[in-house]
Image: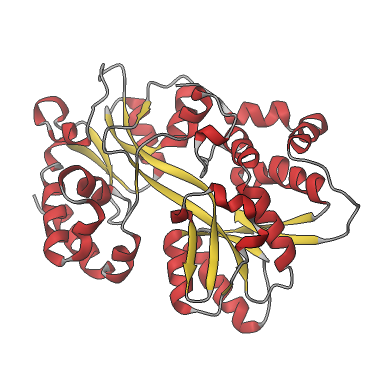
């Protein structure tokens, strides 16, 4: 597994020459244009990376200027967009929605405009799961993905577990794991994929109870129920835990910085989350938005984002020029698809059942 320090990569390739190279990979504009598009993305390092690498390459390829808009997590952004739409304003023409927020937006209605797939031929490279369609049409096209993965400290765990089920072995992992404390952090999806029938298990309250009861069996092996990324990071660095669940991309950065951590894909896979590009119903930039989404769906752009931002591509590796090491640094197989609709439809019961389990011995 390659050790790519993306922060160093950003510093070394952010110059004009690097951007010109990125743009030349993806074509040049046929004519000079003055069109523009406001694009929302999560702030901080994520947005900075888009501004340094993706947006300039898109502008060079199409002539369309990008105005970057900082957006918070998808749930908060959904509220912002609801309020903005009611007020008749457009904070961003195109913005990122995680799948759960996209489902909510679809159910609310009137927030997202349908897109024409005929104008986004490159989206055919994506698996159909990542092209979200409701009664109005296609309202979301996958942008990039990320994984919550199995992690271990290779100094203590010589052979990574072949299955998540091995974490239930008290003889090897007693009081040594770090598991997310949040009910919707995808740990129940891991349990469902490992011991039950996957997403279908969430269809009934009895199934949910069975999942939580199986999770209860792991309490003896769990030293840390973490609710913040920094808690698990420090626990792994300090040796307080020797394994558990964590974010694949962050684990890769930690490994690149010399810490003893290995992100691993067991036979059941790891939960995959993803963000979709969505168009505001009040935007007058549909044509520009479809050009941007088409550009984003191109395998060359997906590979560019993997290298420069650390996101997992939504196209098959064979369609990109990513090396095996580059692909392993950001992605893996198989993927566990979280039970998004169940978490929305039965949120109260899932949360209460989960919290009761955590509060009891």
Relative horizontal placement of residue 346, taking residue 52 as reference (left or right) = left
Relative horizontal placement of residue 203, taking residue 10 as reference (left or right) = left
Q: Which of 233 and 137 is in front in this view?
A: 137
Residue shown at the point (25%, 20%) measured from the top left: 157
Toward the right, the furthest residue is 32
Q: Which of 160 and 116 is in front in this view?
A: 116
Say above or below: 36 vs 17. below
Displayed quadrant of residue 335: top left
Say above or below: 161 vs 206. above
Visual colour scheme: secondary structure
Q: Which of 293 and 210 is in front in this view?
A: 293
Relative horizontal placement of residue 2, taking residue 360 as reference (left or right) = right
Residue shown at the point (42%, 36%) measured from the top left: 248
Q: In which quarter of the image is the N terminus?
A: top left
**Residue 210's spot in the image, x, y percent?**
11, 55
Question: How many marks do you count on the picture?
Answer: 0
Displayed quadrant of residue 306: top right
**Residue 254's spot in the image, x, y percent?**
46, 28
Relative horizontal placement of residue 2, taking residue 344 as reference (left or right) = right
**Residue 88's spot in the image, x, y percent?**
67, 82
Say above or below: 221 vs 39. above
**Residue 182's spot in the image, x, y percent?**
30, 53
Residue shown at the point (33%, 65%) measured from the top left: 341
Residue shown at the point (60%, 29%) measured from the top left: 321
């Amino acid at each position: 597994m390659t050790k790519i320090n993306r922060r160093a990569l950003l510093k070394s390739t952010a110059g004009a020459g690097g951007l010109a190279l990125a743009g030349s990979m993806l074509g040049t504009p046929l004519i000079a244009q003055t069109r523009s598009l406001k694009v929302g993305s999560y702030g901080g390092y994520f947005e900075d990376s888009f501004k340094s690498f993706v947006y300039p390459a898109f502008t060079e390829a199409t002539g369309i200027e990008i105005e970057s808009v900082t957006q918070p997590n998808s749930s908060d952004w959904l509220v912002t967009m609801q309020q903005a739409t009611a007020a008749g304003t457009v904070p961003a023409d195109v913005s990122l929605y995680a799948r759960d927020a996209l489902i909510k937006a679809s159910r609310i209605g009137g927030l997202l405009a349908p897109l024409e797939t005929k104008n986004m031929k490159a989206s055919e490279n994506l698996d159909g799961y990542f092209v979200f369609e409701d009664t109005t049409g296609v309202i979301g096209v996958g942008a990039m993905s990320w994984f919550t993965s199995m992690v271990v400290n290779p100094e203590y765990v010589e052979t990574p577990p072949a299955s998540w089920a091995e974490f239930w072995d008290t003889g090897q992992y007693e009081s040594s794991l770090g598991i997310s404390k949040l009910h919707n952090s995808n740990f129940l999806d891991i349990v469902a994929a490992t011991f039950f029938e996957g997403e279908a298990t969430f269809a009934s309250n009895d199934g949910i109870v069975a999942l939580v009861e199986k999770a209860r069996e792991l309490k003896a092996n769990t030293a840390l129920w973490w609710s913040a990324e920094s808690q698990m990071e420090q626990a792994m660095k300090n040796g307080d835990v020797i394994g558990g669940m964590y974010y694949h991309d962050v684990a890769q950065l930690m490994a690149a910085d010399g810490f003893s951590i290995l992100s691993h894909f067991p036979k059941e896979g790891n939960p995959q989350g993803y963000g979709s590009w969505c168009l505001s119903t009040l935007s007058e930039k549909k044509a520009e938005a479809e050009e941007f989404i088409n550009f984003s769906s191109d395998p060359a752009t997906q590979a560019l984002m993997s290298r420069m931002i650390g996101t997992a591509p939504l196209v098959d590796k064979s369609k990109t020029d990513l090396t095996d090491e580059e692909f392993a640094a950001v992605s893996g197989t198989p993927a566990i698809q979280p039970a998004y609709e169940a978490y929305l439809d039965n949120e109260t019961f899932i949360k209460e059942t989960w919290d009761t389990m955590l509060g009891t011995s």
